[in-house]
Image (cartoon, rainbow, N blue to C red):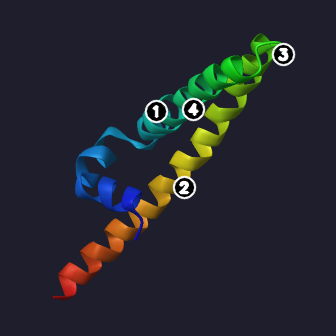
C-alpha cells in the first residue's frame, strides 16, 4: 500500500465526514494543482526568462488543478477501498 493511502487511512473517518468534494478541492486543486502550478511557473521563469511566463502560468494554472482533481479522486477511491477492506477484515476477526 502506498504512503499516501496509509497517510489518509489513519484519519479517514474525519476526512470522509467532511466530504469528497472538500477533499478533492483541498488536496487536489489547492494542495497539488495550485502548488505545482506555482512552483513550475517559478522554475520556468528562472530557467527561461526570455519566453512568455504569463502564457506558461495561464497554462499551468489551468492544467495542473485539473490533474489535481483526477489525482484526488483516485486517492479518495483507493483510500475508501482500503478502508472498507480493513473494516471487513476487522469484523471477521
Q: Secondary structure at mark 1?
A: helix
Dot placed on the residue nearer the N-terminal end, 4 or 2? 4
Disc 2 designates what residue?
74
Please state if 14 lies on the left or on the right of 73 as rendered: left
- Residue drawn where x is 49% and y is 33% of the image: 25
- Residue drawn where x is 62% and y is 20% of the image: 42
Q: Residue 6 appears in which quarter of the rendering?
A: bottom left
- Residue drawn where x is 58% and y is 22% of the image: 38
Gap in angstroms between the C-alphas marked 4 and 2: 18 Å
Disc 1 designates what residue?
31
Gap in angstroms between the C-alphas marked 3 and 2: 34 Å
Locate residue 17, reporting x and y percent. 29, 44
Gap in angstroms between the C-alphas marked 1 and 3: 27 Å
Q: Secondary structure at mark 3?
A: loop
Please state if 73 lies on the left or on the right of 40 as rendered: left
- Residue drawn where x is 84% and y is 15% of the image: 51
Which mark lies nearer to you, 1 or 2? 1
The image's mark for residue 51 is: 3
Q: Is residue 93 above or below residue 1?
A: below
Disc 3: CA contacts within 10 A as few (<14), some (14-19) or many (>=20) = few
Dot placed on the residue nearer the N-terminal end, 3 or 2? 3
* Residue that extends furthest to the right in the rendered view of this protein: 51
Disc 4 designates what residue?
36
Q: Quadrant of the C terminus?
A: bottom left
Q: Nearer the viewer, residue 22 or 65?
A: 65
Q: Nearer the viewer, residue 41 or 79?
A: 41
Amino acid at each position: 500500500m502506498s504512503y499516501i493511502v496509509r497517510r489518509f487511512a489513519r484519519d479517514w473517518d474525519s476526512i470522509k465526514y467532511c466530504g469528497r468534494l472538500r477533499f478533492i478541492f483541498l488536496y487536489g486543486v489547492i494542495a497539488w494543482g495550485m502548488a505545482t502550478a506555482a512552483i513550475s511557473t517559478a522554475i520556468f521563469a528562472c530557467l527561461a526568462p526570455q519566453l512568455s511566463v504569463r502564457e506558461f502560468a495561464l497554462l499551468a494554472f489551468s492544467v495542473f488543478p485539473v490533474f489535481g482533481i483526477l489525482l484526488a479522486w483516485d486517492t479518495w477511491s483507493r483510500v475508501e477501498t482500503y478502508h472498507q477492506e480493513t473494516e471487513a477484515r476487522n469484523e471477521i476477526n
